Image (cartoon, rainbow, N blue to C red):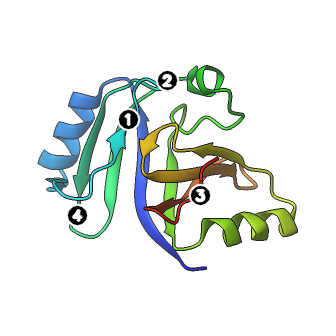
Amino acid sequence: MKLKLHHVNLSTENVERMDAFYREVLGLERESGGLPVLEKSKGYAGDVAFVTDGAVQMHLAQKDVMAGFATGHVVNPVARGHIAYRTDDLKAFKAHLDEMGVPYSDWGNAAVAGWHQIFFYDPDGNVIEVHEVGSNAEPA
């Protein structure tokens, strides 16, 4: 199982302002390829802007402290934001977390079509996402 940094998600009250800041001040560009298809009818309907440095994406997501409740999940990835890794074997990674005694919330594809996502906390309460894309991504 391989992990690769995919994106950093920042939660914000004002997506347009954050998008302008990261593009104008930091010189990031709007991401045009490989964008997720948001599942806005499954509990999180917030706006999201996507910018990139050419290697790693930033997802600037509208803050929603109720998204965990709306989707029935313990971990809410859009209350404070999160860091996300892509894996080629989510099943093996979940088994690894189970072996390590790290609880996680399995969102399946509730937020993004075609991405099977899990979320968990690091020791300081920061949210980490690990996801797998494509036909190998098992359903929740």
Query: For mark 2, what is the residue?
Result: 64
Q: Position of residue 137 (x, y in %)?
A: 53, 60
Looking at the image, the residue that sits furthest to the front is 135
At horizontal 27% and vertical 70% (from top left) the residue drawn is: 55
Q: Amino acid at mark 1?
A: Ala
Q: Badge 3 is on which residue?
A: 138
Name the quadrant of the N terminus. bottom right
**CB within 8 Å, label 2 to label 1:** yes
Count the labels in the image. 4
For the residues marked 2 and 1, what is the alpha-carbon distance in whole angstroms? 9 Å
Q: Which element carries disc 1, helix, strand or loop?
A: strand
On the image, numbered disc 1 is attached to which residue? 61
Q: Secondary structure at mark 2?
A: loop
| Residue 40 occupies quadrant | top left
- Name the amino acid type tagged 4: Asp
Q: Nearer the viewer, residue 88 or 136?
A: 136
Residue wearing tag 4: 53
